[in-house]
Image (cartoon, rainbow, N blue to C red):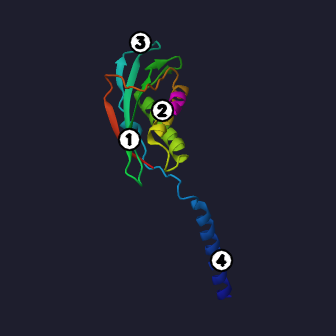
């Protein structure tokens, strides 16, 4: 009885191991490490909002280092994120703007980088992230923009490596 239970357990382990081996996939797949936290995004107010009215403006400058682990190749992906202080939907707190910006950046980098290969040009990956953000950030906060160049008053925030 014990021998049969041991044999059954061994077969289960062998089945799980073979499934796991099938899940590894091709060796050129990329795995992305790195994540931006909301508190890391530092917005600066560019234009104050008039009391109770839509308007006002804040900007942040983002610099993300994108690295390829197997070669050491690296680039700095730079862009800005600008949001209104108050839009037609109401006031937008700094904490909300930070959370949305961090969420959209993390989603974009995960989507773009995880579908890349080890041969994907890092500059093209950066441009793809910015293109994605130009759609997703304004969809999340009406009136937002993702310019290629940071506002002159926004201090660059350097984020750790997003490593492929």
Residue sitting at x 53%, y 46% = 116
> Whole-percent x and y of residue 76?
37, 38
Residue sitting at x 41%, y 16% = 56
Residue 112 as seen in the image, left or right of residue 123:
right
Labelled disc at residue 11: 4
* Closer to viewer: mark 4 or mark 1: 1
Query: Which numbered disc flags the more N-terminal residue, 3 or 1?
Result: 3
Residue 134 falls inside the magenta stretch: yes
Q: What is the span of residues highlighted in magenta in the rendered image?
A: 130-136
Labelled disc at residue 75: 1
**54 or 68: nearer the eye?**
68
* Separation (CA) of disc 2 from disc 3: 33 Å
> In the rendered image, which residue does mark 3 sit on?
51
Query: Which numbered disc flags the more N-terminal residue, 2 or 3?
Result: 3
* Separation (CA) of disc 4 from disc 3: 70 Å
Query: Which numbered disc flags the more N-terminal residue, 4 or 1?
Result: 4
> In the rendered image, which residue does mark 2 sit on?
130
SS of the residue under disc 2: helix
Query: Which numbered disc flags the more N-terminal residue, 4 or 3?
Result: 4
Query: Which numbered disc flags the more N-terminal residue, 1 or 2?
Result: 1
């Amino acid at each position: 009885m014990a021998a049969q239970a041991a044999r059954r357990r061994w077969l289960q382990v062998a089945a799980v191991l073979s499934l796991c081996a099938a899940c590894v996939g091709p060796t050129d797949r990329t795995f992305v490490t790195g994540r931006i936290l909301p508190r890391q995004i530092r917005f600066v107010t560019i234009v104050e909002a008039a009391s109770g009215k839509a308007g006002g403006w804040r900007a942040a400058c983002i610099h993300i280092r994108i690295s390829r682990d197997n070669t050491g190749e690296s680039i700095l992906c730079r862009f800005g994120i600008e949001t209104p202080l108050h839009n037609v939907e109401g006031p937008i707190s700094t904490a909300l703007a930070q959370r949305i910006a961090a969420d959209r950046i993390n989603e974009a980098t995960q989507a773009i980088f995880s579908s890349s290969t080890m041969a994907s040009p890092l500059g093209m990956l950066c441009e793809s992230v910015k293109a994605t953000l130009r759609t997703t950030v304004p969809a999340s906060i009406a009136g937002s923009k993702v310019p290629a160049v940071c506002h002159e008053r926004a201090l660059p925030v350097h984020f750790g490596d997003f490593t492929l």
